[in-house]
Amino acid sequence: MILIFDNSEQITERLIELIREEKKDSRLDNATTYQQAVKILQLSDPRVILLDIKFYGNKTIELLKKIKLSNKKTAVIILFNHADEQSMKQCKDHGADFFIDKYYDFNKIPGIINSIEANV
């Protein structure tokens, strides 16, 4: 299962399209609020999570901690635009596995997901 936690419905929709183009049978779910994300996490065992670095109310680090506490094997891809070094370092320190610039590296996401799933 792949989860997408991003504030922007536009970004979320594009990510779903991008992933489905490559992986037609992937189970996907998404949340645009922290509360939705926590509920989805309680009900699922995701292999990959795409997480906005500026997720709802700056709760990215709190959510990242929950993800890694509940399942250390879940790969977390941090999505960012204009992220500062401190935020990036905090995400890395709390277990983020990959960092993707939403503007420049969007097309790399399916390949990263494929490599994660190949190493299961």
Image (cartoon, grey):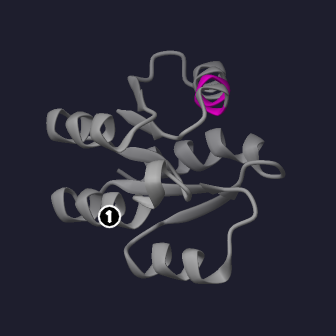
Residue 31: in sight, yes or no? yes
Q: Residues within 10 Å of mark 1 (few under 14, many from 20)?
A: few
Q: Which residues are magenta?
A: 11-15
Picture residue at 21% right of the left edge, 57% below the top? 71
Q: Toward which corner of the image does residue 59 lie, by quadrant?
A: bottom left
Picture residue at 74% right of the left edge, 44% below the top? 106
Q: Toward which corner of the image does residue 98 lie, by quadrant?
A: bottom right
- The N terminus, quarter of image: top left
Q: Nearer the viewer, residue 53 or 98?
A: 53
Q: Nearer the viewer, residue 58 or 2?
A: 58
Q: Nearer the viewer, residue 64 or 44?
A: 64
Magenta stretch, main secondary structure, is helix
x and y, in percent, of residue 103 in the image: 81, 48
Picture residue at 60% right of the left edge, 50% below the top? 112
Q: Amino acid at mark 1?
A: Glu
Relative vertical location of residue 13 with respect to residue 43 in this rendering, above or below: above
Residue 72: in sight, yes or no? no
Image-based side of 2 in relation to 68, left or right: right
Relative vertical location of residue 34 with respect to residue 65 in this rendering, above or below: above
Image-based side of 46 in relation to 55, left or right: left
Residue at the top extreme?
A: 24
Element marked by disc 1:
helix
Q: Is residue 14 part of the magenta span, yes or no?
A: yes
x and y, in percent, of residue 78 in the image: 55, 58
Disc count in the image? 1
Image-based side of 83 in relation to 57, left or right: right
Write down the residue under mark 1: 62
Q: Is residue 29 part of the magenta span, yes or no?
A: no
Image-based side of 30 in relation to 85, left or right: left
